[in-house]
Image: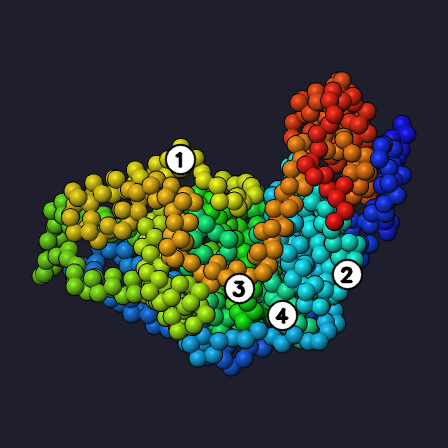
Amino acid sequence: MDTLTSLHSAQACTSGPEIVPAQFPGPDRRAEVWPAAMPSESPLAMPVQSLFRFDRAKERGQRRPRSSGWSWLARFLVFGGALMLTFYGANEMYEVVSVGAVTPLEWALVTFFVLNFSWISLAFSSAVVGFVWLLFARPKPPAIPAKLKQRTAIVMPIYNETPARVFGALEAIHAEVEATGHGAAFDWFLLSDTTNPEIFIAEEHAFIAMRRRLGAAARLYYRHRPKNIARKAGNIGDFVSRWGGRYAHMVVLDADSLMTGDAILGLAAAMEADPGAGIIQTLPLIINRNTLFARVQQFAARIYGPVIAAGLTAWMGRDGNYWGHNAIIRTEAFAAHCGLPSLAGRPPLGGHILSHDFIEAALIRRAGYAVYMLPGITGSFEESPPTLIDLAARDRRWCQGNLQHMRVLPAAGLHWASRQHLITGIMGYLASPLWLLQLFVGIILVFQASYIKPEYFTSEFTLFPAFPRFDAERSLSLFALTMAILLAPKLFGLVLSLLHKPTRKGCGGPILLVVSAFLEVVMSALLAPIQMLIQTGHVTHFLFGFDTGWNPQRRDDGSIPFSAIVRRHRSHVAMGVLTLIAGLLISPSLVAWMSPTIMGLVLAIFISWVTGELIFGLGLRRIGLLITPEEKHKPSVVRQAKWRAKELAELTASADGLKSLYADPEFRAIHVAMLPTGPMRHRGDISPEWALAEAKLLEAETIDEAIHWLKPVERMTILLDAVLIAKLIELAGTAPPVIATGDPLRQTG
């Protein structure tokens, strides 16, 4: 039992300042001092907030932020313009169907049209304001002071991600900040909720390698949470409630985030200069994408994204929103006012709040802190899903979270702008079924006009017959107006890019930029009907009470098997074929009118396959299409992240997590010391996974036999329990254990 005693001693060491691996039994001892994986705790109370009780006098953190006159002018233009457009469109649609008596189906068509038209009108008017702002006064980044006075934590929550990618990214950001000379103001945290045992061990290898390369002065920390309760919101909440008292602010990153040193400093400087700010958001641009699908998204975000962001910034003022990452947060205010409650009832619309960021922004704004975006801060990046199927998987999670917001909308004390942000998130997914319903009603009306004999004189006495007719000319004009409103934000972004020399040159020059924009419009038009059906399926799924999982996002550019593409899109193709046949039977002009929708659906399998293949995306890049300035001239942080990830990938290529733990006593000592303090379970509280893991360890004669028997959940149970680890290392080995190539525990530089 000497080994077990040593392991328990190591576990108790996590609350102290350092760990000494040399005190553990095993070969190749060394007197290396290993700093604790986390600093000493400095708790902040994070009470759960009530959504439906709020006393402004008692619960406000400070006085309500006041929006500027420019923000109110922008709001008048955005919402007033959208309202005028909506009234105009509604009147025109009524005139289209009111040539004869308006039937219930025609009223349904008008209703769906008005709902959809109001949504795109708001986006259009916001883009107009953003276009004018960027045309005459591009926003500037905040000034950087000579010295930062307050400490900031950089936190990256991770969940079953590729360790080399996320650790390499954080190391690159760390190097960027250190190069500015302000590195002493920042501490760095990797907050793991990983449940995969192999990835868990690889994370620890990567952490050890980074610690040894950067040194203890880097203030790099790693925490693994045994259970990912409340997902990302719970991960951040655990950090804030245990260590948040050490830091005035925290910059929250995603697993695919990258930020330059200047961007990090800009956020910290802006937060220090504005004591009334609760959250300050950046505009992340998409980078590192290679498939055709992802490159279309990357190009669109770079060319059109700034216009949309500028419009939002103009009208939101200090009543803005939070997108969950690449933003800075005032830690004490977040702890005091952003503890998320669980929604009553079962998932999908009950339970933990999944899309937590919008709600956190609404709650901290309710408490009197400003939330706003600084589009002038450049150097904020993220990645996007590589294929349409990957985007659908991510959208499925976001859809469930945003539909939960319907239950938060009536919450007490929320600012009207916060409610508007929630409505925007909800409509982002409800718009798809509304468009689909409008299409169906339109098809039925055309079918009715073509095949059902009209009853000109009803049973009620009337002097005039009821002719079911449409104003075709007005209908065509309204269709043209709708398309113009949809495409206008893209045109605004293209014009601004052509006028801005760095962007124009970075996209390959004016000709290639215009051709790329045209290609993006065509691809988006073909993808839109597929995404409409996908999102409609998600909404239907959740409204009927079915929950979804929360698997990690696939971030690599590897292709999806063609058979999986066929399975995912065969229903979309069937819908397209049926629509085509029905259209031909009803009216050839109907097919011409719906040709973009029909073509996108009929070719769904082909489109999904082509856009997900690397060869097509890289081919367009070679001829200069869909390129962005950040792709042509890669920022330093992007280049560093790539080669640091490659180095770490070689160091963390462990064949088996348990073998790695079994093989090296030094790594085992560090691993056990980094486990949570205190007992993992109470005496007598034995879970089925723990009992099965122990039984298999006792039954096995060799480490290989045990590994062969153990399931992933049982392996994870062993990795999290010092008692089971002691039983593991007592097993015999059948061959020299295989551990990571270029073992990080032996790396010194």
Reading the image, the residue beneath label 4 is 266
Q: Amino acid at mark 1?
A: Phe
Question: How many numbered discs sit on the rendered protein?
Answer: 4
- Viewer-nearest residue: 449 or 23: 23
What is the distance, in whole Å, between disc 1 and disc 3 at their CAs? Answer: 35 Å
What is the distance, in whole Å, between disc 4 and disc 3 at their CAs? Answer: 13 Å
Reading the image, the residue beneath label 1 is 562
Q: Amino acid at mark 4?
A: Gly
Res 687 → quadrant? top right
Q: Amino acid at mark 2?
A: Gly
Reading the image, the residue beneath label 2 is 245
The answer to whether any part of residue 695 appears in the image is no
Residue 54 at x, y percent in the picture: 64, 64
Estimate how packed mark 2 is, as few (under 14), some (14 to 19) or many (20 or more) residues with alpha carbons within 10 Å.
Answer: some
What is the distance, in whole Å, between disc 4 and disc 1 at their CAs? Answer: 45 Å
Rendered view: 48 above or below 152: above
Label 2 or label 4, whichever lies nearer to me, is: 4
At x 61%, y 46%, the residue is 646
At x 81%, y 49%, the residue is 36
Res 481 → quadrant? bottom left
Reading the image, the residue beneath label 3 is 283
Q: Secondary structure at mark 2?
A: helix
- The tag earlier along the polypeptide, 2 or 3, is 2
* Left or right: 709 in relation to 287: right
Estimate how packed mark 4 is, as few (under 14), some (14 to 19) or many (20 or more) residues with alpha carbons within 10 Å.
Answer: many
What is the distance, in whole Å, between disc 2 and disc 3 at their CAs? Answer: 28 Å
Query: Do the CB atoms of the residues marked 2 and 4 lie less than 8 Å apart?
Result: no
* Left or right: 192 in relation to 528: right
Label 2 or label 3, whichever lies nearer to me, is: 3
The answer to whether any part of residue 34 appears in the image is yes
Residue 208 at x, y percent in the picture: 74, 45
At x 45%, y 61%, the residue is 628
